[in-house]
Image (spheres, coloured by chain):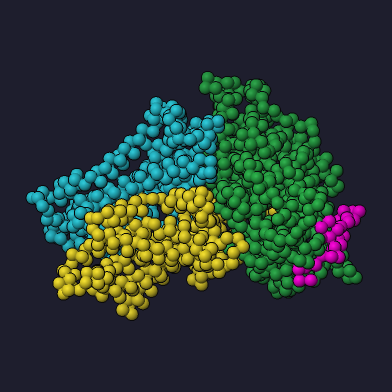
Amino acid sequence: MKQQSRTLRLLVALLGTLALVATACGPTGPTGGGTAAPDEKPVAGGRLIEGSFSDIKTMNPMLVADVPSSTVTGKIYDTLFSADPKNGELKPNLGKWTISSDSLTYNWEIDPKANWSDGKPVTGEDYLTALKLVALSKLTVRKSNFQDIEGWKDFVDAKATTISGVKVDSTDPKKFSVKFAKVFCPALVNAFGSSAGPMPTHVFGKYTAAGQADAIDKAPENTAPTVASGPYVFKEWRKGDQVILTKNASYFKGAPLIDEYVYKIVADATVLAAQLKTGELNYGTVEPKDLADMEAQQNLKVFKYQALSYTYIGWNVKSTTAPALQDKRVRQALAYGLDMDAVVKSILFGQGTKMVAHHPPASWAAPGAGLNQYPYDKAKAEDLLKTAGYTKGADGVYAKEGKPIEFSIVANSGNKTRETLLQVATEQYKAIGVKVNPKLEAFETMVDKLTTGNQEIQGWIIGWSLGLEPDPYGIWHSTQIPNPAAKTTGFNFGAFTNADFDKAIETGRSGNCSQAERKKNYETFNKILNEEQPYMFGFSPNTLLVTPQNLRAIDPGTFSATWNLEKWWFKQ
Amino acid sequence: MATTTADIAAVSPVSVPSRRASAGLWSDAWYRLKKDRLTMASIAVLVLLILLSAAAPLFEEHVFKFKFAQQDLLGAYAKPQLEKPEYLLGSDEIGRSQVVRLLYGGQISLLVGFLAAFIQLTIGVSLGLIAGYKRGLVDDAITFFITVLNSIPTLFLLLIITALFSPGPLTLIVILGLIGWTGITLFVRGQTFALREREFVTAARTVGASGSRIMLKHILPNVLPFIFILAAIDVGGIILVESALSYLGIGILPPTPSWGNMLSNAAGYFNLAWWLVVSPGVMIFLTVLCLYLIGDGLRDALDPRLRGAS
Amino acid sequence: MRTYVIRRLLYAIPTLVAIATITFLITRLAPGDPIRLFTFGATDLTREDIEALRAAHGLDKSLPEQFALYIVNAAQLKFGNSILYHKDAMSLVLERLPNTLTLAVTALVLQLVIGVPLGVLAAVNRGKWIDNAVRFFGVIGHAVPAFWFGLMLIIIFSVTLRWLPSQGVLTVGKDVWDIGDRLKHLIMPAFVLALAGIANYSRYLRTETLDVIRQDYIRTAEAKGLASKTVFMVHALRNALIPVVTALGGVLAFLISGALVIEQVFTWPGVGQFTYAAARQKDYPVITAGVMLGGMLLVLSYLIRDIAYAVVDPRIKVK
């Protein structure tokens, strides 16, 4: 689960993240993959200028915790594996791997052509360096990714000088193996992903020496990387304005054709769309309201593909102030009573898909057919309310024992889509006899109340941005319910829990790690969610990526838009 | 927003020789004010704006027949027109009536302006009187506190407080009131300094009047006319600040309409409906302009040493 | 004179301490937790990780303990590491100071260069149309909401006419020393920031110049036979400028404050915009660093103003 983006105004959290999503079903954008006509010869040159609402914070993968930093850092430091853009399947990138039969040891071999931009080869030692840096840093949030590696704890506690579970082959420095203490399915993504890309030992090694403690946190190379393993090398960071990268001529997959990559800060979605039109920017995602405008531009093309995220209305299923929400039938009624297709059509201009369970359609863990799609049905909704023991009062609101079905839904201000969803929900629920009090709050306040389990919250609208790893433990397991009494925080805000449910999550992450087996657990998991409806699962939006017509070879998908960045070129 | 003391530095409570037989400070002032057409016009416009905003529910009900929260997705981005009275000034991205929202927005903006100014004046005048009259340690403490507050850029402080605390409208009024009384205090303090040396104050003291009695009954009435000038400028300043905060997304939050947040909303799609950016800005501008002109006019009326007059 | 300066400097110290204390209280008393906000959505984190991060920023200690540490560090101008950027907060803020100063100084120059002559011009041509025009502008220039004015300028000059860029400091691909490009980016925000000041100064100078015109010594100078123009230049302006000097201190305060909103409208990467973004994300170290920097600049400017005032007008006796 990736970090939620934190842009300031007109948050484009759902759409603007170039989160890695694939289209599991259906074709992509109108002009296909921007593939060149067979007789077009790629030429070098040009500058790719990407627009963003927020400045980067760092360029050290282990400190990255926001989308802008991740976008730029990902172009400088390559990772061991990459994901297929369309279906998210993990493929070799910097290295290829095999897993031992007991699923505890991963054997890696780094690509012989993989070098740092200064010519030194990328080796297994570089992976070990990356891990040591994470272990030594005090400011990273990635430590738990590696906790199951043998010898990790000892190194963190300074009882050992290296991590015993990571062994670099003495005969071939490009080969290394990593042994885990227990089976943990998300480990492949967590321990070998973007937070653990190899780091140049010849640059960062000095920070792992004895007595360095957390010196890595202050390293100047964190904001001015000197070498790169990715397609672009850092050149300059004009704070608050733009980040400039130049091409890495010795990139192992071939030198990029586009000379420079610039990451430019703009004020908001309106300015971004305007600059895409004028050509000041030539790469950016837009909101659905700008889609028609973008498609009308002759010199631009739009790629539409599913995002690996969704926006939903959550219910506090243990709420004592809104007891109606405790009843599954009421929640199901609320699912039937909201015309999500109409919402997608009008608010998203059709650029989205209705959701009825946790994993979005693009994810491999997404549920198969057979789930209740909860088509919009006012009559059915009201029937369910009646079955639950409610009767319609004279004021048109259903009530039981004198208590009407009434609750508040809160959304964060500054996000037009969520604000509109809130208004539409209020109106439509009124039509089925449920009284909703809409509230808008600043995002920071909402986050606070949600993560501490503040019982003021009865219903809320927010989104989840998911990553490559579909493990839903952090959001849905019963241990993740925030407890205000014990002052613990967590992301299972609605306090939904169920024994089979917990079990499915647990088996999915520490049982058999083959995709097929894990998928079975997630089927069960999603079925339970689909039936219980602890969320009104809302919609998963499409990413709308805009580039000029003359950008060739670009072929974005749900899980990656820049997987072949080095091959992109501008036709003059 | 803090009134610069330079603005009213030279104003002093001295009665002035005029061209007709002097009948006292107040009636002199009123006479001059009546002749000042610009100021009278400003007062009229301001009163009109206040009445319009106060009557917003009536307009909503009877004239435009369109509620301020009412949406009509089909009528979005309508141009200003006469056929549909509710779209007199156009409609926003979900078809809400701009003119009705402007009227309601006026309620909020004016309310925030006047209430916060009232709080500022209360604090400012009280502290100014106390500091000016008591002098000594009390004065030093108050002056030090003022220096500290003045050394933090006001808007900075406000922005940080509102961003951190995310206050509701009432809390916002209190916060606005609690910051920005410094200019008033400094002015009142200065006036009190001068006044306390006058004979009528010494006389009262001899008779045995208490400090607070002197401050309230003798000094305050002399300072009061100039408080009005400060008040007018103050309200204007607060309205500007509130709209800036709402524009940034931390003042009055939607769906409550405020001229500031209507502007920030409209800025998001001005390429589709630029007229929506114009109307809230014009309203803010008009209101503040009237208030400033009234302040100017009052100053001219009360101290006709011809500061900028003919 | 020297004792005055030293006394003022000493007075500045408790002021700064008070500012630091106020900022600390505001940030710590605000609801919410920066670490929680920062890690929202990162569902692969364990509670231990989050607690460790909180400890790394010193947020796990009790409030009095935090304050003690804070004051000691603040005295050395150390405000801790930014929670978002993982770097020293004050250095991050200082990196953006040149941008804000460029904006503020340009605005100040515009105010003086446009406002002062306008005021004098109006006074000299009292009653004529130019006088009325300047007076009219002087009044409305104050009442225009700055951010709205900036927005309208962007709509007109950037979007419709495409003459000027709407935001940022430099166009992509331009060299850092490209003055022409920098000026194109600077002119709109600086002008918007300067607007209220131009109005202010023009009214001020007009009033002061009118005042001075009536003074006896001017009539004496005229009687002595000096050309009228010289009279004004030499005598009128010098005396009229005294109040201008006094106002300069407060002007810097206004500029730094006002710059914040302008920086937002024009996405100008200055201290104001940076501190505000930090406030939205509860990045305490940066907030305190930014406010302290603003406070220090202001205290310094008031000090300079007071000294300049004492130098320029020796009639003013220091208390």
Given residues A389 and B186, the one toward you in this image is: B186
Across and down, in percent, residue C166 comes to 52, 54
Colour of chain B in the image: cyan
| Residue A418 is at least partly visible in this image | yes
Query: For this view, does A435 lie left or right of residue A111?
Result: left
Tell me what residue is drawn at x 61 percent, y 23 percent.
A390
Q: Which chain is green?
A: A
How many dots with numbers?
Answer: 0
Q: Quadrant of residue C107?
A: bottom left
The quadrant in which the C terminus of chain A is found is bottom right
The chain drawn in yellow is C
Q: Is residue A342 left or right of residue C152?
A: right
A188 part of magenta stretch: no
Residue A437 picture location, percent across and down? 53, 34
Q: Which one is in front, B121 or A21?
A: A21
Q: What residue is rendered at 33% in x and 38% in y?
A: B50
Q: Residue at x 70, y 70 (%)?
A: A226
Q: Nearer the viewer, residue C281 or A567?
A: A567
* Magenta-colored span: A92-119
Q: Residue furthest top?
A: A394
| A111 magenta-colored | yes
Residue C25 visible in the snapshot: no
Percent position of residue A41, x then y:
79, 56
- Seen as rendered, the residue at the extreme bottom is C2
**In the rendered image of this protein, does residue A125 appear above or below residue A349?**
below
Q: Where does residue B179 sit, x and y in percent of width and height?
A: 39, 54
Q: Residue at x 86, y 61 (%)?
A: A108
User: From the viewer's perspective, is residue C305 above or below residue A449?
Assistant: below
